[in-house]
Image (spheres, coloured by chain):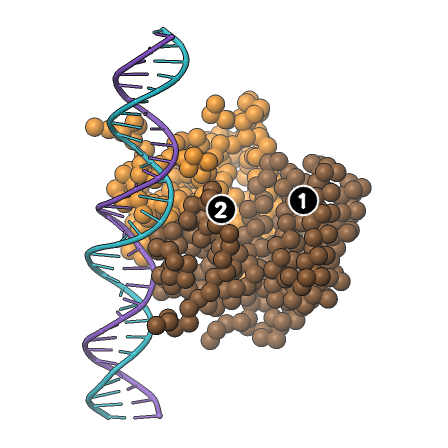
Chain colours: A orange, B brown, C purple, D cyan
Amino acid sequence: MAKHHQLDVPEIPMRADLTTQEYVYERLRYAIMVGAIPPGTNLTMRGLAEAMGLSPTPIREAVRRLSTEHAIEVLQNRRMTVPNMSLGRFEELLALRIALEVHAAERSLPYISNVIIDEMRAVDRQMDDALSDNDLDQLTILNQTFHRTLYRANPHQVSMPVIESVWLQMGPFQRQVIENIKEYYTVDRHKEILDALSSRDVAALLIATESDIREGMSRSARQQLTKVPGGNQVA
Amino acid sequence: MAKHHQLDVPEIPMRADLTTQEYVYERLRYAIMVGAIPPGTNLTMRGLAEAMGLSPTPIREAVRRLSTEHAIEVLQNRRMTVPNMSLGRFEELLALRIALEVHAAERSLPYISNVIIDEMRAVDRQMDDALSDNDLDQLTILNQTFHRTLYRANPHQVSMPVIESVWLQMGPFQRQVIENIKEYYTVDRHKEILDALSSRDVAALLIATESDIREGMSRSARQQLTKVPGGNQVA
DNA sequence: CTTGACAATTTGTGATATCATTTAATATTA
DNA sequence: TAATATTAAATGATATCACAAATTGTCAAG
């Protein structure tokens, strides 16, 4: 006898070095990021536990972590959902993402080596492949890997976790944006970022970073959100 | 028979609307913020549970949340500490804090009303009182309240949680800085912030915000850190 | 006095049980 | 039929239990 409508959380490979709680965290994070748990979905601890075949204990811990990152919203009734996007929240997240990533890029530049640039080029090539294969989930992940490789060049990294949190909050939405492949591909500014890194040109790097983020998300996303001015509220 | 050296986590008032887990989170957060759990302290789940007279379950959930905010570091052996500060990390945190708060202040300005300015003035006056009473914990909290009141004027707030996380990471250190009362008081730029808000002067607001943060933390903190170039590593 | 092996203890982790609260379902009444 | 009261089921929260891994303490050998 099936539950109301059993939640499907995409499986990810279980590594031996992960505790169950960490595995659940990674799995839920991935599910939210690629939009497998659409905003507004009603989540329960026990439902998630059942969906993954685990006890509620590690589920709770993972969910608590995600709620701290605002990837899961805990309502007053103690019910939980993936937060809905509104135009206002989207614009704030976009502005915050730009501020953070421009900042992180600038502070990484002094630590950039050719090794890192080559790594980023390799990731960029993988993105072309993922695009050919039409693998949108992979494209999302690789796009993040591209940026992450840059920001982590800074050895005293403290902004990366914050940026990851913002990515996660925009995640379910970004996925929808990426589905508009042609437009997404057109506005990809990775080449400009790589060129700016090669020439160690701060100003160009900041402009390219901001453009990549803004143009990558702005157009189709805002178009989608402005359709319903108040946002996608569920009632 | 007493444990090795029983951990003392300052009590905070238990409100009826808090779950045990939330109470533990608030209490640990406060303890870290005011430096009651000095960096490097070896923490255990069961030790914390015993120190608060609770079962390990809610402790674990709260600790997981704090580790996600990087207020508690989970080591590879699954041992836990409050992270030590190093000069490199400190400078990254300071730069991130400035980037974030300048950003948040700018995006709050359009929503600033006289009511909010008056609120901030009131908090500033309370800080004078706390200073007279030599209540440094209260001074730390009020300083945060001052800034929080500004940033939360923006109704679609998304940067506040991020800023809180950075505060928490600098917390144990900021506290040591504030103990240098005279110097701290001298560099307080709250009046400039209030003036900039009253005149709706963006440029002045950003300058005042950056100055308040940088001067408030920079001098004595860096002095302290440069003493031990590698940071306060425990061995 | 130092080093290394081994036992005892402590600890993190995850599952389970219990209880209060909330939600859903059913029955009852207007 | 619609609204409300009543009952049943599901859920979140916390404590406890069981187990494996890690740590600490002890002691003998060098």
Q: Is residue B172 visible?
A: yes
Instruction: Give the residue at x 71% y 57%.
Output: B129
Residue B167 to residue A85: above or below: below
Kind of residue at disc 1: Leu
Instruction: Give the residue at x 27% y 45%.
Output: A55
Q: Are marks 1 and 2 in contact (CB under 8 Å)?
A: no
Left/right placement of residue C21 relative to residue A148 reads: left
Q: Would you call the spot at circle 2 few (<14 residues within 10 Å), some (14-19), or many (20 or more)? A: few
Residue at the disc numbered 2: B15
Q: What number of labels is visible?
A: 2
User: In what quadrant of the picture does the N terminus of chain A appear?
Assistant: top left
Nearer-N-terminus badge (1/2): 2
Residue A218 to residue A55: above or below: above
Label 1 vs label 2: CA separation? 26 Å
Residue A215 to residue A190: above or below: above
Q: Nearer the viewer, mark 1 or mark 2?
A: 2
Kind of residue at disc 2: Arg
Residue B100 percent across, percent down from the top left? 62, 49
Residue B224 percent across, percent down from the top left? 63, 71
Residue D17 percent across, percent down from the top left? 21, 55
- Most foreground residue, A189 or D12: D12
Residue B216 image-quadrant placement: bottom right
Residue at the disc numbered 1: B150
Q: Secondary structure at mark 1?
A: helix
